[in-house]
């Protein structure tokens, strides 16, 4: 009813065919002053003057389209203002005026009545205000949450900054302690070596008393080509195992020495260097070797569970082994075996008691004797503990450092999202987005976090799993304000190029809330 | 290390795969070399190829067999191969109205169990022969006879008896010769020779003799043994893993026609070569003949003579003196060789036509002008169905718009960006498992509501319906088709089963009128659930495409209605399918008064009567944009005027520049649709940011502003069959420098377009034709006049080089609307461009834009004439209904190239004096708001 009145007020019917409009029909409130009746009308955005009678006369005179605010004559660039009383006023393209489609809620764009438009601004306005209020409410909640996130972010940032300082401070004394321990262990070792030499000398003396050492060695050489004798070897080793105390008694003794001792089946530790290779050849295809490999494997499995423990040790090993490796280039298999065995023993030497106990049952008894770990063992375990602790701290520093150096947004607002993941289950897949890390579609990688884009409104994940006949998968996370962190609306606009929307308080802004509130006011 | 090796191998395999999808796998498709019938025909003129199979057949007219049957307007005679006693052919010669000579030949006494196919349902029922009379009666002495039209002196035909030759004379000059190169080849239908017990080897002499005879004498079973070698491919043929059982044996036909005095032939679409067809044989040319066999070619390449999705076996020859044509009415696989020759007149174009089966049925179109050629061809096969106005707007397609929400968003996107469009399309994914006429209930739960939402803005929707039917017993179409026995049968008589989108599929036999009728009923609103009057149809894959069939199509030994093989009717399959679908759209409405819109990929001669055609699966490459113009021009010459190419290129991802240029080109091509592959990135016009969105919008808006011109031109096609998109030589037939031009064209006779089809094009040469007649052209953007000749212009991204011909009057609607419907009541702007004699004329056609009422006279066909400073507006047709009053006005009249008048007066009461503006720099007069009704005659005087 209102709209009909309005049209009647603003339209003056001249002829049956041509409707003459008020010159202000379709003019927005902020431009009304330019449409005051006069002799001439100045086109608003171009330097053209026309007789005022040509305003809203259904013929486009102004290149900018401003002389026809109420008709479709300047449809390419003109605009029409819907008053929409009860809702909010808005501009539509002049091309929508009298096109048979209701665009204004008050129906003012269809005054030629090609279509009967209801004035439903009141209903729409109410609905819209309700929605607007909901939006504003949600926005306000979002902003509150954002504040909380900022607070949390700042708190965490400060904590982490403190922590990194603390950790850095802690590193120095530990490094010092490690150095000291290393010196101490070196000392102990050299003491042991002296002791060993002394023992060796004593043994040499004894050996001179014992006959036939050479002959035994000769026999040993023959065994190489006689697999049958492997069985003997095994037995020998078995026996040796029972008497194996000596071996572990001196943990610093080279593995090859041990092997030598094993294969000889004697307590004799003397002719170590001469026999290394031969002994190992003996063990080829032997059960013996298999056992050892098994052991080796088992230990390696354990290794994975104690990575930190072993990292340092491995380095040590390498240092120790360099000389031998150089000598053993000729025979890879042997070398490998030797190395592995060496690693086994070295590891055993340095592994914590608990781990040691774990390995113990799977190692042949003959190799190990706990009670002989002695003083040096204690020091080394202490050293490895320290190293472990150092590594842990260094890792922690690195982790925190990486986080602190990331783009965490204003007031570190993104920190609460750091190292979190968000899921969206669709009919086909569950999508997972871990900000700063990675994204996936089920088990398929959609990429690693690459950067923020679009003024911080988008997270880009790239270099995901290669697409068959296409690019590597990638994901754009399009962020918008919301009261919770929530994914929705996944799309694949290009082959294997995904987008997903992400509601998050982070994207809520005071400025936009102000605009929303203003819009709300306008609609009244 | 091993991983590395695997990786390397994988990457090599991948790159091979990627390489292979970048272009067509030519090994999948036959050339003449792979087709025995083509080799048999072509071998006789291939340079340097040993004639291992046959020598040329010499056909003679049997003495005393020539008779003119006056009642039938027909001359009959028998043909016999030299030195042969059997295998008589009978030949019929006729002249049809409008100057068309027809020649038909087939076996005089065909076998009872085997038949030759004569193309059905392509020629109009209305064609009529005219009385003919001897020009010179047959006589042995002269070895010739000649005959002509009984009344009019258009042309005459001279026939030589021994050996048989047929020459068509136009204006008393030799224009087209037949069999002048003795390439007439006819393999009589025969029964398969039974294998004989081995005989002793014949002497060499006997062997030779036998070889000479065997080809044309297959039922002479005595020579069977020697045929073992040379009859390879006669009774069985293989291509790749596919076997063709060929139960009918060899039955190919061949003929040569020479266009005398011509060096340019056009037509036989659809190929990716230039408009002016290239020579495929002759000195130093090693090209395969043009192939006409409807095929679904994946990622086709440019400048190839290989077959594509549809074909029209019409060739037009043009030289400065005359325009003539040959229409080879045959639906089987056909090859055409083209050769430049110097006999009998230098230069001439010799063409050699080879078909695998069917009768010889040739129409000689005697022209002698381009416009008469189009009339003659339209007389035979009809004109383009007048499109609904909406279908001339912009179409937005993608494989696939994924859901109802997706559709709504795209639809709103156009409004938000103020870009007009008319139709949104749904590709195969909208269906329930590729069962056509069904909907994916998850993504399209309320299809009717969706169409109503689109329809509220008076826009339309198109869904795809393909001819392969999913073999699923729970699918009503399949179960009904199966129980009714409506499927094409394989060679063993079972329902043909091939692989297509739904997996295992069968194909309805649309050559059967009963099945076409049944198919049409499937489009009823009661059958096609969820369809509404806003829904129109897209027919794809109707070559037919069979993924696991030979050349991605159907086995040639599949069986059709009437006992014909697929080989006989192959090129008609898509045509019939298109026809049945369009019939369905008409019949679904109780009043049957809504013009159908069905887009088809496959086509044949006559498809113009049914609906729109597009050039299939092109690629997002500049070369594909460039070739779209020659391809569409070629189709336009062959009657398929409502045709277009996918804007943006179907495969791949165009960059913003290519997409923009493609929109600009597409806006000036008859059918205007953006489309993209499933794997392609979204490319709705607003997704490429500025300046691209604005420039694309401008291109689409321009399209809409010229819709009255398009619509009028399509209407004019229904009167004269002339191409809507027209090569320049059609309008300027004497200007030989235009005969090779296919990157410029005219819309109707008034608007010249040369779309930019080169990357980073900054400047470009434009050839403005008509130097001989002092033509003036007006750049439609600047409105500046330019004399005919070659000009160089700047082509910034926003420039679409379009020129209005001086002497033309174009009606436009310059108000931008969201779609065509909203423009119906908008006022016209009339743009008059004066020629050097300060005159111009043009037409405007108006009707309700959607129904068949125009056939009952409810239309306006108006004539604008400007002469001696007087513009008169009157009826251009005595068929217009005086009661049709669309209540639409003219809001603006622009006259370019005119002197400033003191005043402008009009003979309509109340409009005696009209206000105007004058721009002296452009000599441009704008009559402001005359507000004259388009149904009223008026005279406007510039004083």
Image (spheres, coloured by chain):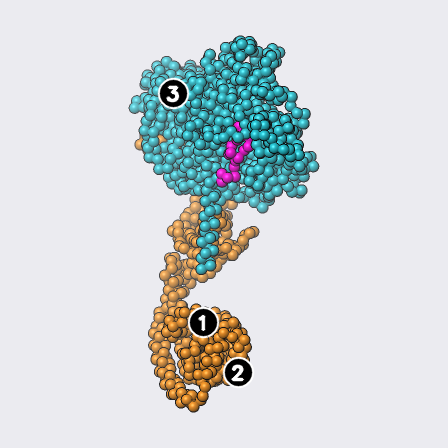
Image colour assigned to chain A: orange
Q: Secondary structure at mark 1?
A: helix
- At a point 52% along the width and 39% down the height, the residue shown is B28
A151 relative to A490, above or below:
below
Q: Quadrant of residue A191?
A: bottom left
Q: Residues within 10 Å of mark 3 (few under 14, many from 20)?
A: some
| Residue in the image at 36% along x and 15% along y | B869
What residue is at 45 percent from the left and 69 percent from the top? A333
Is residue B478 visible to us here?
A: yes
Along the line of sight, which residue is nearer the eye, B653 or B121?
Answer: B121
Secondary structure of residue under mark 2: helix
Q: In this picture, which residue range is highlighted in magenta?
A: B25-42
Chain holding disc 2: A
Q: Which residue is mark 3?
A: B735
Q: Please check the rendered image and state whether residue B39 is part of the magenta-colored stretch, yes or no.
A: yes
**Residue B781 badge:** none
Q: Which residue is mark 2?
A: A239
Horizontal and vertical percent position of residue B822:
49, 30
Q: Colour of chain B?
A: cyan
**Residue designated by label 1:** A334
Q: Residues within 10 Å of mark 2 (few under 14, many from 20)?
A: some
């Amino acid at each position: 009813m209102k709209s009909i009145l309005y049209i009647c007020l603003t339209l003056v019917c001249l002829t049956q065919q041509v409707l003459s409009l008020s010159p202000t029909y379709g003019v927005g409130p902020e431009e009304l002053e330019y449409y005051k009746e006069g002799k001439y009308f100045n086109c608003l955005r171009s330097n053209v003057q026309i007789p005022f009678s040509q305003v809203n006369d259904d013929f486009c005179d102004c290149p900018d389209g401003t002389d026809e605010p109420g008709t479709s004559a300047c449809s390419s660039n003109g605009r029409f203002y819907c008053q929409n009383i009860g809702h909010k006023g808005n501009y539509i393209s002049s091309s929508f005026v009298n096109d048979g489609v209701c665009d204004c809620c008050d129906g003012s764009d269809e005054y030629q009545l090609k279509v009967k438009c209801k004035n439903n601004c009141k209903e729409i306005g109410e609905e819209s205000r309700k929605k607007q209020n909901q939006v504003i409410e949600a926005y306000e909640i979002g902003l509150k949450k954002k504040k909380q996130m900022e607070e949390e972010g700042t708190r965490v940032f400060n904590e982490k900054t403190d922590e990194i300082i603390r950790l850095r401070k802690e590193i120095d004394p530990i490094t010092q302690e490690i150095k000291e321990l290393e010196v101490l262990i070196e000392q102990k070792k050299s003491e042991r070596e002296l002791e060993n030499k002394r023992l060796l000398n004593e043994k040499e003396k004894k050996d001179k008393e014992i006959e036939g050492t050479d002959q035994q060695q000769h026999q040993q050489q023959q065994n190489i080509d006689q697999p049958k004798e492997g069985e003997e070897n095994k037995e020998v080793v078995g026996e040796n195992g029972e008497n194996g105390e000596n071996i572990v008694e001196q943990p610093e003794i080279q593995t090859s020495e041990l092997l030598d001792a094993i294969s000889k089946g004697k307590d004799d530790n003397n002719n170590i260097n001469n026999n290394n290779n031969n002994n190992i050849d003996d063990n080829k295809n032997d059960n013996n070797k298999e056992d050892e490999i098994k052991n080796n494997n088992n230990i390696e499995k354990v290794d994975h569970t104690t990575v930190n423990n072993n990292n340092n040790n491995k380095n040590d090993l390498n240092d120790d082994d360099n000389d031998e490796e150089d000598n053993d280039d000729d025979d890879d298999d042997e070398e490998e075996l030797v190395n592995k065995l060496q690693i086994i023993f070295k590891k055993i030497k340095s592994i914590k008691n608990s781990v040691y106990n774990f390995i113990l049952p799977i190692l042949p008894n003959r190799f190990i004797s706990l009670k002989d770990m002695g003083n040096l063992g204690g020091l080394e375990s202490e050293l490895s503990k320290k190293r472990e602790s150092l590594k842990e701290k260094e890792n922690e520093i690195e982790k925190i450092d990486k986080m602190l150096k990331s783009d965490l947004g204003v007031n570190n607002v993104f920190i609460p999202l750091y190292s979190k993941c968000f899921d969206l289950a669709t009919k086909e897949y569950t999508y997972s987005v871990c900000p700063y890390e990675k994204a996936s579609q089920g088990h398929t990688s959609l990429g690693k976090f690459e950067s923020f884009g679009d003024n911080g409104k988008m997270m880009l994940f790239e270099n995901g799993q290669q697409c068959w006949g296409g690019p590597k998968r990638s994901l754009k996370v399009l962020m918008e304000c919301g009261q919770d962190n929530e994914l929705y609306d996944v799309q694949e606009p290009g082959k294997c190029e995904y987008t997903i929307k992400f509601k998050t308080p982070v994207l809520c802004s005071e400025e936009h809330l102000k605009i929303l509130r203003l819009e709300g006011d306008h609609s009244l | 290390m091993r991983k590395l090796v695997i990786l390397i191998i994988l990457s090599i395999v991948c790159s091979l795969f990627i390489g292979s999808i970048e272009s067509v796998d030519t090994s999948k498709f036959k050339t003449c070399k792979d087709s025995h019938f083509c080799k048999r025909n072509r071998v006789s003129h291939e340079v340097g190829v040993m004639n291992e199979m046959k020598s040329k057949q010499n056909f003679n007219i049997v003495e005393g067999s020539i008779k003119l049957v006056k009642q039938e307007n027909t001359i009959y005679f028998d043909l016999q191969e030299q030195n042969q006693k059997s295998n008589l052919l009978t030949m019929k010669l006729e002249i049809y109205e409008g100057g068309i000579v027809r020649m038909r030949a087939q076996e005089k006494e065909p076998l009872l169990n085997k038949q030759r196919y004569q193309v059905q349902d392509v020629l109009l029922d209305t064609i009529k022969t005219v009385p003919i009379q001897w020009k010179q009666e047959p006589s042995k002495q002269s070895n010739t006879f000649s005959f002509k039209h009984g009344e009019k002196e258009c042309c005459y035909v001279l026939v030589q008896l021994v050996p048989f030759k047929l020459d068509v004379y136009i204006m008393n000059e030799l224009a087209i010769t037949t069999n002048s190169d003795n390439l007439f080849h006819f393999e009589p239908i025969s029964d398969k020779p039974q294998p004989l017990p081995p005989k002793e080897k014949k002497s060499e002499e006997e062997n030779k003799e036998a070889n000479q005879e065997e080809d044309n004498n297959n039922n002479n079973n005595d020579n069977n043994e020697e045929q073992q070698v040379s009859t390879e491919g006669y009774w069985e043929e293989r291509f790749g893993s596919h076997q063709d059982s060929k139960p009918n044996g060899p039955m190919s036909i061949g003929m040569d026609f020479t266009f005398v005095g011509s060096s340019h032939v056009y037509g036989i679409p659809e190929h990716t070569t230039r408009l002016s067809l290239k020579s495929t044989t002759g000195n130093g040319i090693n090209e395969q003949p043009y192939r006409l066999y409807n095929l679904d070619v994946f990622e086709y390449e440019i400048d190839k003579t290989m077959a594509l999705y549809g074909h029209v076996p019409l060739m037009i020859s043009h030289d400065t003196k005359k325009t003539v044509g040959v229409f080879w009415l045959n639906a089987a696989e056909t090859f055409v060789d083209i050769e430049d020759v110097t006999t009998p007149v230098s230069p001439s174009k010799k063409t050699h036509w080879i078909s695998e089966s069917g009768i010889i049925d040739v129409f000689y179109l005697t022209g002698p002008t381009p416009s008469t050629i189009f009339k003659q061809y339209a007389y035979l096969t009809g004109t383009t169905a007048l499109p609904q106005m909406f279908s001339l707007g912009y179409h937005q397609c993608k494989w696939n718009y994924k859901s109802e929400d997706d559709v709504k968003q795209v639809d709103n996107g156009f409004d938000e960006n103020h870009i007009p469009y008319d139709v949104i399309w749904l590709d195969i994914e909208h269906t329930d498992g590729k069962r056509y006429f069904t909907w994916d209930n998850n993504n399209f739960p309320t299809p009717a509501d969706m169409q109503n939402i689109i329809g509220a803005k008076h826009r339309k929707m198109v869904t795809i319906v393909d001819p392969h039917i999913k073999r699923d017993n729970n699918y009503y179409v399949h179960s009904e088709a199966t129980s009714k026995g409506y499927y094409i049968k394989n060679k063993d008589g079972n329902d043909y089963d091939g692989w297509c989108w739904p997996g295992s599929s069968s194909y309805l036999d649309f050559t059967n009128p009963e099945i076409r009728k049944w198919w049409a009923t499937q489009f009823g609103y009661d059958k096609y659930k969820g369809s509404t009057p806003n829904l129109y149809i897209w027919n794809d894959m109707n070559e037919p495409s069979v993924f696991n069939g030979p050349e991605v199509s159907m086995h040639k030994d599949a069986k059709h209605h009437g006992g014909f093989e697929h080989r006989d009717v192959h090129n008609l399959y898509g045509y019939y399918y298109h026809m049945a679908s369009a019939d369905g759209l008409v019949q679904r409405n109780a009043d049957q008064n809504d013009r159908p819109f069905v887009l088809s990929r496959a086509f044949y001669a006559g498809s113009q009567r049914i609906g729109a055609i597009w050039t299939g699966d092109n690629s997002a490459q500049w070369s594909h944009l460039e070739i779209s113009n020659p391809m569409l021009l070629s189709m336009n010459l062959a009657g398929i005027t409502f045709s277009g190419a996918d804007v943006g290129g179907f495969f791949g991802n165009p960059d913003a520049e290519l997409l923009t240029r493609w929109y600009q080109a597409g806006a000036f091509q008859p059918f205007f649709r953006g489309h993209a592959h499933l794997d392609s990135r979204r490319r709705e016009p607003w997704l490429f940011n500025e300046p691209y969105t604005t420039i694309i919008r401008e291109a689409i808006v321009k399209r809409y502003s010229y819709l009255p011109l398009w619509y009028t031109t399509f209407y004019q096609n229904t009167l004269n069959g002339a191409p809507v998109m027209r090569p320049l030589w059609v309008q300027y037939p004497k200007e030989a420098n235009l005969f090779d031009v296919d990157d410029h064209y005219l819309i109707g006779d008034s608007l010249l377009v040369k779309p930019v089809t080169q990357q980073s094009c900054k400047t470009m040469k434009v050839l403005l034709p008509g130097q001989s007649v002092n033509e003036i052209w007006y750049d439609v953007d600047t409105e500046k006049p330019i004399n005919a000749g070659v000009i160089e212009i700047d082509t910034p991204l926003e420039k679409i080089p379009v020129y209005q011909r001086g002497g033309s009057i174009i009606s436009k609607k310059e108000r931008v609307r969201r779609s065509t419907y909203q423009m119906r009541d908008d006022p016209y702007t009339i743009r008059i461009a004066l020629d050097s004699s300060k005159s111009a004329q043009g037409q405007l056609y108006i009707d309700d834009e959607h129904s068949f009422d125009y056939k009952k006279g409810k239309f306006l066909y108006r004539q604008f004439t400007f002469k001696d400073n007087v513009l008169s507006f009157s009826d251009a047709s005595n068929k217009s209904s005086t009661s049709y009053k669309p209540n639409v006005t003219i809001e603006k009249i622009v006259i370019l190239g005119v002197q400033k008048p003191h005043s402008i007066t009009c003979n309509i009461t109340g409009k005696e004096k009209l206000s105007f503006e004058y721009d002296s720099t452009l000599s441009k007069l704008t009559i402001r708001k005359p507000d004259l009704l388009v149904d009223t005659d008026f005279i406007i005087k510039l004083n």
